[in-house]
């Protein structure tokens, strides 16, 4: 997530982490589920680990390296996406997606695996089962897993309901639990992504954050990591549109925030699925927060190739970069080959 924003309210049993904070407005298919073409609410709830809006100049990185907090990491990543509400379309097919977010998001995650993904691979250096406060796992503990194949294990259009126009955290968490029951999954290796449709504005979206991740519990009491993923292109430059020069990459500048924001939350879920028990720095920032909205120099957001397809991403924090001093990297082949 970007820098943490504390919740004004939270569901019992949850520890909210806000995701990708917004970029300031000034600065800033895959399956048969997808079609070919691509009111006054409560005061905004903000999560503790959200990606905030982009500001004209990225803040200096502070807080030192990430340290282990004693909780779990994701050792076998599985992604499940729920398109929340009939605003996405009726039946089982997404038809209302003017910016192509659903197809782009799905393609991004479907390409994030194996040796063809040297971007999210940087997070495999982090682990569980070591002493609290550890900053270098080495060969100890059980490490964050890197998918050998497509990690998207399920998608579902929940068209049985109309999503609230401005849902808060409780409603989003409830939809994640509903989706988990639909898929028959739970536990810290699961990431349920709750996708809001075009025109739906979760509380705080566009003004306080771009997305956030958190965890809740299923009806059976199991832990359940989930992500609040608003319709990012609706925020324009505030959530990454035009943030990275696309050149001849084929990446659509208007929707590049979808993968910048989505990648931020994915990496933070891998390393801190039950915030903040996984990997955070002394200031409480997670792996994505420390590297969010860097426009130039080391760790700048860029276009990367994942298994032959190009996507805009931000860099992620690597403790073992720069001889253990740490830093933001977009490419990671090994502890000694990073950039």
Image (spheres, rainbow, N blue to C red):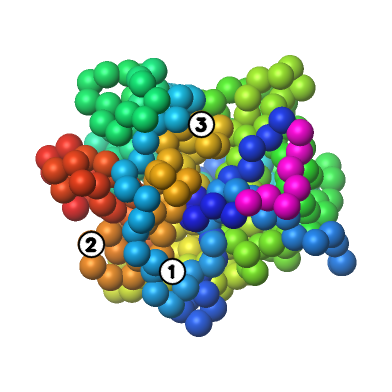
Q: Report whether 3 appears left or right of 247.
A: right
**Disc number placed over residue 168 in the picture, else none:** none
In this rendering, the answer to whether 86 lies above or below 41 is above
Task: Give whichever of discs 1 and 3 has the lower sequence position.
Answer: 1
Residue ID at (71%, 25%): 218
Boundaries of the magenta span: 6-12
Give residue 314's position: percent from left, percent from top: 37, 57
Give residue 169's position: percent from left, percent from top: 73, 47
**Disc number placed over residue 277 in the picture, else none:** 3
Q: Report whether 86 appears left or right of 26.
A: right
Q: Nearer the viewer, residue 197 or 239?
A: 239
Badge 3, how many Cα within 10 Å: few under 14, some, many 20+? some
Task: Give whichever of discs 2 and 1 has the lower sequence position.
Answer: 1
Mark 1: secondary structure: loop
Badge 2, how many Cα within 10 Å: few under 14, some, many 20+? some
Q: Main secondary structure of the magenta part?
A: loop
In this rendering, the answer to whether 55 lies above or below 181 is below
Q: Is residue 54 visible?
A: yes
Badge 1, how many Cα within 10 Å: few under 14, some, many 20+? some
Mark 3: secondary structure: loop
Q: Indicate the quadrant where residue 88 lies.
A: bottom right
Q: Report whether 144 appears left or right of 234.
A: left
Mark 2 or 1, closer to the camera: 2
Is 7 inside the magenta-drawn segment?
Answer: yes
As drawn, which residue projects farthest toward the bottom? 26
Mark 2 or 3, closer to the camera: 3
* Mark 2 lies on residue: 298
Spatial separation of the CA atoms under disc 2 and disc 1: 23 Å
**Disc number placed over residue 252 in the picture, else none:** 1
Image mark count: 3
């Amino acid at each position: 997530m970007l820098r943490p924003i504390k919740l004004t309210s939270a569901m019992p049993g949850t520890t909210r982490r806000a995701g990708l904070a917004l970029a300031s407005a000034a600065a800033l298919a895959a399956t048969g589920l997808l079609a070919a073409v691509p009111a006054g609410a409560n005061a905004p709830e903000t999560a503790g680990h959200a990606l905030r809006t982009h500001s004209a100049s990225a803040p200096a990185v502070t807080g030192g390296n990430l340290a282990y907090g004693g909780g779990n990491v994701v050792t076998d990543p599985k992604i499940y996406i729920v398109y929340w509400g009939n605003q996405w379309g009726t039946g089982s097919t997404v038809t209302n997606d003017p910016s192509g977010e659903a197809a782009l998001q799905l393609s991004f995650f479907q390409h994030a695996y194996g040796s063809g993904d040297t971007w999210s691979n940087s997070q495999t250096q982090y682990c569980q089962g070591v002493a609290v406060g550890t900053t270098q796992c080495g060969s100890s503990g059980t490490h964050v897993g890197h998918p050998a194949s497509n990690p998207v294990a399920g998608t579902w259009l929940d068209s049985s309901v109309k999503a609230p126009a401005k849902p808060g955290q409780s409603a989003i968490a409830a939809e994640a639990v509903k989706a988990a029951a639909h898929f028959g999954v739970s536990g810290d290796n699961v990431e349920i992504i709750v996708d809001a449709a075009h025109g739906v504005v979760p509380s705080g979206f566009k003004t306080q954050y771009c997305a956030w991740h958190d965890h809740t519990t299923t009806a059976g009491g199991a832990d359940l990591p989930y992500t609040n993923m608003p319709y990012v292109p609706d925020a324009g430059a505030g959530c990454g549109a035009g943030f990275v020069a696309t050149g001849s990459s084929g990446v659509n500048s208007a929707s590049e925030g979808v993968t910048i924001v989505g990648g931020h939350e994915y990496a933070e879920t891998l390393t801190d699925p039950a915030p903040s028990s996984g990997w955070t720095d002394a200031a409480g920032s997670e792996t994505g927060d420390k590297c969010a909205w860097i426009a130039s120099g080391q760790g700048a957001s860029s276009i990367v190739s994942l298994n032959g397809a190009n996507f805009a991403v931000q860099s992620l924090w690597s403790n073992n970069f720069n001889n253990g001093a740490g830093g933001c990297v977009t490419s990671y082949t090994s502890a000694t080959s990073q950039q």
